[in-house]
Image (tube, rainbow, N blue to C red):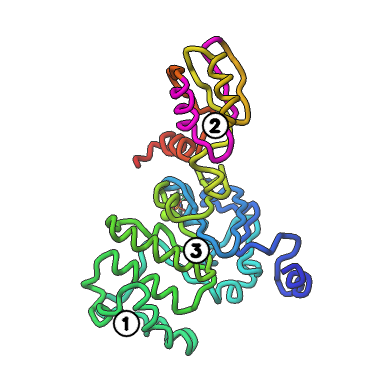
């Protein structure tokens, strides 16, 4: 990939930024008058993963996606898609990108298949050849001859995905794709997204729901008031933290020796006769440490996880902005 950069540097390919990612942004900012909708966002989205852009309503998710698709111009900052700079090399960058922004729009009086035909007719010949496969893929094969007017929201979302597939995308960008779906629909959607990732495609999903992102994505950026406050692999950000926890026990001396024997942690420091700060090891939840202590006859009064995990962090953001989950 580095050769690609240097060879094509003069034609708008990425210069000076790491091009191993399918999407890179640097200090991307969008202002509407005095309001900053997207504030200095620097993203690095690797190829072949599902990436979640998670934030409460009004956090700037749709605005970011609109910039990535060249639908609105950034106020400042840089972005590169598939190795091509935007907005200068928009058509090259977007030739293998499929996207749905907010709700997908269709001609209601046309059938699902006809809608895809209309779309394919302004694309290349290959797009036409992909229509049947795309409809099957999203589970609309049997309903494709019905007018979209009668489609449920879930069916329209799936038709939107089918439309994305017509360009055989390397990158799918889906803005809140699971909004309004019932639990069964969400589950199907999740499987579909994972199957795209299995094929080597990259999927970027925005959402205001932590649960959707946690269950679907490999990596996440959390956005608050236009700013990315955290970014990384989900396995690093969720669940088992590798920080510290404060255990309140009936005897910190006893607890310390039990913990040393079990080797479940990276160490423990006595804070007081009844308090012990434990250095957590990756992959070992606090519940396992508690069990070992209780099994050894130690009473565990409370555990204070001192490292905020993704859920704590996201709840703090949404509580602050008054958004109800
Ligand atoms: N075209 C626009 N003109 C003015 N303000 C806008 C426009 N689009 C979005 N905004 C504002 O930018 C902020 C982010 O909006 P948006 O990107 O839609 O957030 P999200 O998709 O995360 O809900 C909001 O405060 C919104 O009101
Ligand atoms: Mg939005």
Helix, strand or loop at mark 2: loop
Q: Quadrant of the C terminus?
A: top left
User: Tag count in the figure?
Assistant: 3
Residue 33 visible somewhere in the drawing: no
Which residue sits furthest left?
150
Quadrant in the picture for residue 75: bottom right
Tell me: residue 56, above or below residue 191: above
Residue 123 visible somewhere in the drawing: yes
Helix, strand or loop at mark 1: helix
x and y, in percent, of residue 56 in the image: 43, 45
- Work out whether mark 1 precedes mark 3 in sequence or the reverse, and give the earlier one: 1
User: Over which residues does the magenta segment extend?
Assistant: 273-296
Rendered image: mark on residue 113: 1
Q: Nearer the viewer, residue 164 or 275?
A: 275
Taking the spot 40% from the left edge, 75% from the top edge, the residue there is 163
Helix, strand or loop at mark 3: strand
Rendered image: mark on residue 138: none
Taking the spot 37% from the left edge, 70% from the top edge, the residue there is 160
Do the residues under discs 2 and 1 have CB atoms within 8 angstroms?
A: no
Report which residue position mark 2 lands on: 307
In this rendering, the label closer to the viewer, 1 or 3: 3
Alpha carbon distance from label 1 to label 3: 24 Å
Quadrant in the picture for residue 45: bottom right
Do the residues under discs 1 and 3 have CB atoms within 8 angstroms?
A: no
Membership of 283 in magenta stretch: yes
Report which residue position mark 3 lands on: 203
In this rendering, the label closer to the viewer, 3 or 2: 2
x and y, in percent, of residue 170 in the image: 54, 71
Which residue sits furthest bottom?
125
Membership of 223 in magenta stretch: no
């Amino acid at each position: 990939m580095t050769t690609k950069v240097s060879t094509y540097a003069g034609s708008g390919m990425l210069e000076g930024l790491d091009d191993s990612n399918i999407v890179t942004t640097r200090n991307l900012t969008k202002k509407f008058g005095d309001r900053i909708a997207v504030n200095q966002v620097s993203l690095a989205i690797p190829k072949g993963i599902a990436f979640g852009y998670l934030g409460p309503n009004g956090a700037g998710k749709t605005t970011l996606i609109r910039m990535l698709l060249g639908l609105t111009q950034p106020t400042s900052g840089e972005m590169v898609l598939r190795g091509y700079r935007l907005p200068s090399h928009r058509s090259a960058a977007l030739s293998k990108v499929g996207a749905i922004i907010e709700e997908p729009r269709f001609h209601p009086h046309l059938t699902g298949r006809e809608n895809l035909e209309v779309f394919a007719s302004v694309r290349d010949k290959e797009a036409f050849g992909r229509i049947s496969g795309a409809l099957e893929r999203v589970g609309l094969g049997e309903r494709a001859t019905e007018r979209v007017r009668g489609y449920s929201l879930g069916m329209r979302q799936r038709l939107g995905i089918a439309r994305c597939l017509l360009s055989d995308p390397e990158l799918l960008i889906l803005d809140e794709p699971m909004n309004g779906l019932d639990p069964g629909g969400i589950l199907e959607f999740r499987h579909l997204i994972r199957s795209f990732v299995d094929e080597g495609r990259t999927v970027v999903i925005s959402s205001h729901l932590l649960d959707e992102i946690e269950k679907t994505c490999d990596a996440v950026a959390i956005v608050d008031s236009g700013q990315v406050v955290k970014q990384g692999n989900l396995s690093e950000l969720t669940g088992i933290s590798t920080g510290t926890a404060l255990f309140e026990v009936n005897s910190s001396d006893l607890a310390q020796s039990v913990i040393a024997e079990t080797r479940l942690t990276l160490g423990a420091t006595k804070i007081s006769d009844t308090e012990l700060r434990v250095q957590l090891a990756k992959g070992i939840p606090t519940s396992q440490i508690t069990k070992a202590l209780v099994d050894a006859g130690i009473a565990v009064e409370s555990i204070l996880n001192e490292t905020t995990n993704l859920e704590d962090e996201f709840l703090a953001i949404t509580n602050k902005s008054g958004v109800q989950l």
